[in-house]
Amino acid sequence: MKRTLALGGVAAGLLATALVTQPAAAAGDTVSTPLANNAIAAKNIASFWWAENMAQLKGATPYDVETQVVGKHVSTGGPTADTKPGIVPAIGDEKKTTSTSKNVNLPKTTGKVFFRGADGKSHWCTATSVQAAYKNLVATAGHCVYDVEGNKATLDRWVFIPGYYQGKTPWGIYVGKQAFTHYDFDVYEDGDRNYAFVTVYNGLKLPHGGLKDVTPENIGSWVEVSSDLAKQYEHWLKKFKNGKWYVWKFFDAGRLGDNVGGQGLAYNQKVGQNVYVFGYPSGSHPDGNHAYSGHTLKWTYGKTFAAKASDIKAEEIIGIKSSFTGEGALGSAWLSQYKSARRLGYLNGVTIGVSDTDKNNRYDTSVSPYFDGETYGVYKAAANLWSGSIA
């Protein structure tokens, strides 16, 4: 579904429906909402995506809550820092390094988040792993976590898969445990606060060959459980064989940050800095040109500039010149001071929409919330919480 907004006073497309649910928990400007409360719920979510030879993963489509901005960017006004500039170092980059590279090596931290939308279908956005005390945190656009289309607080069956490609999950599936966003986005859908941070459980992986039936040869891949416990698992995760109930044995893939690393965080930065944007753009330009498949990670590079979108109460967002299309690119990581040799930088934005500013029917601009001290407050609330193993 395409929505309308105004960038610099000109009509465009994004969020419109107000959230009707109340925040699950709030501390200051931060709202926290559970995604999977326990190990059984998390395993059921992972199994949904693995079932039937990963049919739901392979059939998922780019989330189409996209922004189509048709105005010119704003060169005056825009975002301002609310406190002093600050940074959080990336995982493994806590000590300052000065490496440089002419080549752009793609970060392992970026991947796709999969979920069920308000339409009952499977979709995906881009997201990235970021630094956290327990190496378990993911950042993406707020509307790639919170359900702005339906009556539920969050999107259903939310998982992060770094490096996903056509059914392959090289580092496992990381089920979302708890989502964090700004109060103004949760309640008012304020475009200035369209970001979210999600804690994830340790990754889950399957033995080679995937889900198989209970046989004497592979009985070690199943765990016998009581009938009462079996009732808590969904049908494609359990089997009844020889008068006994079995549930599939998942294996612990470890913590997200240990496997793929985690980007740092930068906030209250000066507008006009160079950033790399990494994401999985898909879909077509307005002229019908299908420039991106969404299968592989792409990048763009440029200087940020001030922008605004009054129709979604977004007075302090930033933009970058980019040919990324909106579908699939939502949630793309904006990384400042990116070191290609180390594949690390500082997360300084997430894509929430795209724009055709010169009206030639080709997208040429991406936009993001400006990360300020309130963004850091939401991040900090999520970054110190433990998730643990569910295998």
Image: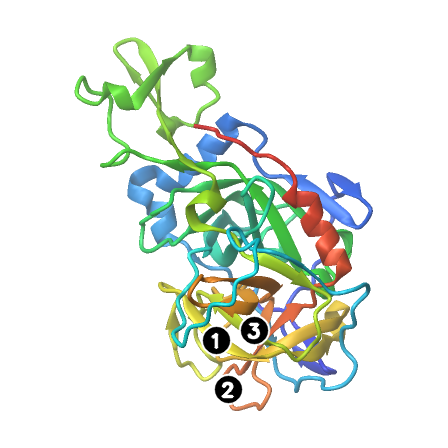
The answer to whether one can see residue 152 in this image is no
Q: Is residue 300 above or below residue 383?
A: below
Nearest to the observer: residue 178 or residue 228:
178
* Corner quadrant of residue 5: bottom right
Secondary structure under tag 1 reads strand
Q: In the displayed structure, does residue 359 sit left or right of residue 228?
A: right
Q: Which residue is mark 2?
A: 361
Secondary structure under tag 2 reads loop
Tag 3 and tag 2, C-beta contact below 8 Å: no
Secondary structure under tag 3 reads strand
Nearest to the observer: residue 151 or residue 264:
264
Point 52% across, 72% down: residue? 276
Point 60% across, 42% down: residue? 133
Q: Nearer the viewer, mark 3 or mark 2?
A: 3
Point 42% across, 65% down: residue? 341
* Corner quadrant of residue 251: top left
Residue 80: x percent and y percent?
79, 72
Q: Is residue 88 above or below residue 207?
A: below
Quarter of the image containing the N terminus?
bottom right
Q: Using a 10 Å C-alpha cutoff, classify the residue at mark 3 as few (fewer than 14 neighbours), some (14 to 19) or many (20 or more).
A: many
The answer to whether one can see residue 110 in this image is yes
Q: Nearer the viewer, mark 1 or mark 3?
A: 3
Residue 364: x percent and y percent?
53, 83
Q: Type of residue at label 3? A: Val
Q: Using a 10 Å C-alpha cutoff, classify the residue at mark 1 as few (fewer than 14 neighbours), some (14 to 19) or many (20 or more).
A: some
Mark toward the start of the polypeptide (1 vs 3): 3
Q: Which residue is mark 3?
A: 275
Residues at marks 2 and 1, CA–CA distance in whole angstroms:
19 Å
Q: Nearer the viewer, mark 2 or mark 1?
A: 1
Residue 314: x percent and y percent?
74, 70
Q: Which residue is mark 1?
A: 300
Mark toward the start of the polypeptide (3 vs 2): 3
